[in-house]
Image (spheres, rainbow, N blue to C red):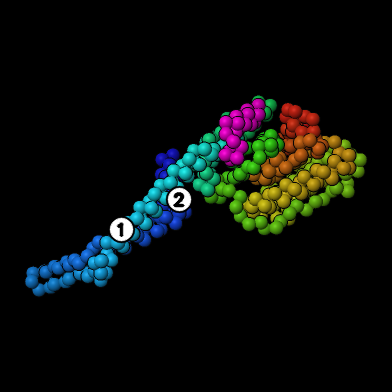
Amino acid sequence: MYRETIDWGVREFLKYLFRPKGFEGRVAAACVPVLVALLGGNWLVKATAKGEYTFEIGSTNVIPAWAQWPLVVLFTGIFAFCVWVGWKRFNRENELRNRKKVVVVEGRGLREDDGSSLAAAVPAEIVGHRIPVILDLRQRRDGVIVDPVALLPEVDTTRRIVQQCSKQNDRQDVTLVYGGLTSVPMTFLTGVVFDDEGNIVVMDWDRTREEWRTLDRADDGQRFIVEGLEDVGTSKEVILAVSVSYLVRTENIATTFDHPVVRLTLPDVTSSHWSASKQSALAQQFYDTAKLLDGKGVATIHVILAAQNSVAFNLGRRYDKRNLPNVVVYQFEADMQKKYPWGVRMPVNGEYQPTIMRT
């Protein structure tokens, strides 16, 4: 705990030390040696060690006396002006920071400890007072969800808290940041209910680095391979198996469902997901596939999703709540006979409240 606090303090100090500065800081710093030289005049330092060694450090002011004091006044004025500009900038940035708010929604559900705070990891470039909001979806069973029905109100409560924070300020002064470690159905649901909250900065937990990160990497160009659309026929219910971090296995699907299967699969499930533009493109493919299924007369899409938290959240945000078919997103349980024992029916297409569907 103390180590994390010290690490955070060191990082914040380094950010402050190397923060972008205005021109006035550089100009004021340049004035200091000029003023020292002008005011130094003639001076001499002489030292003798036991009468044997002597060294001298001296300086002679080569600027005429008539020009020295006008230059001192000029550079003193420039220095004072730069200090005044810097002070005004500092006050303006403080006012901006105090007016703006950053609502940080952190979902917790896959581990019992609180871990590293998402609010402390929000980049300094996102200006505003941090307001942490915890979406606690834990049931004290080390990531195992005992009663999923009890978790649904928590998502709605968090949404109401965020809306209340937004109402207290102009919408343009509020930034929403989301990151979490929660089950796939609850993460997708969070994305669905937060879809109307405008622009959201999405972060994710890096298991290798053990830290929160933004989606700031370059797009590697990988996209879903779509398979199985031709096998849908006239079926009203379809399985949409989305493989991002792991491959959704056919034998696992067969333990629970017998509907036609449409697949969205990344060519390399180990590829990086740390690109916002890549995730946006994958979410668009997901949306386009759902729209094609709607065109084929599908009434319910059963989504089996193996993906990182940020991906599941962004797929939920992209799903059209008004015009696409009903959608149920399922929880994977490897040690159960039915590998997908329950799912969350999302509040879309006339469904105003999420519900739990058991298989």
In the figure, is residue 235 to the left or right of 196? right
Which residue carries the number 2 mark?
15
**Left or right of 278: which side holds 259?**
right
Most common secondary structure along the magenta stretch: helix
What percent of the width, then of the height, locates residue 167?
60, 31
Q: Residue at x 85, y 48 (%)?
A: 229
Q: Position of residue 110 (x, y in %)?
A: 60, 37
List x then y, in percent, for residue 295: 87, 42
Q: Considering only order in the chain, which callout, 1 or 2, is on the residue closer to the N terminus?
A: 2
Q: Compare residues 357 and 122 and report the one nearer the observer.
A: 122
Image position of 122 (left or right of 41) = right
**Which residue type does callout 2 highlight?**
Lys
**For the point 22% across and 70% down, which residue is it?**
60
Query: In front: mark 2 or mark 1?
Result: 1
Q: Is residue 116 visible?
A: no
Mark 1 residue type: Val
Residue matched to label 1 = 73
Rendered view: 13 above or below 298? below
Q: In this rendered view, identify the residue nearer to me: 109 or 255.
A: 109
Q: Quote the CA–CA distance across marks 2 and 1.
A: 35 Å
Q: Quadrant of residue 259?
A: top right
Q: Residues within 10 Å of mark 1 (few under 14, many from 20)?
A: few
Q: Which residues are magenta?
A: 153-176
Residue 40's disc is none
Rendering coords of residue 70 (x, y %): 30, 61
**Element type where label 1 sits in the image:** helix
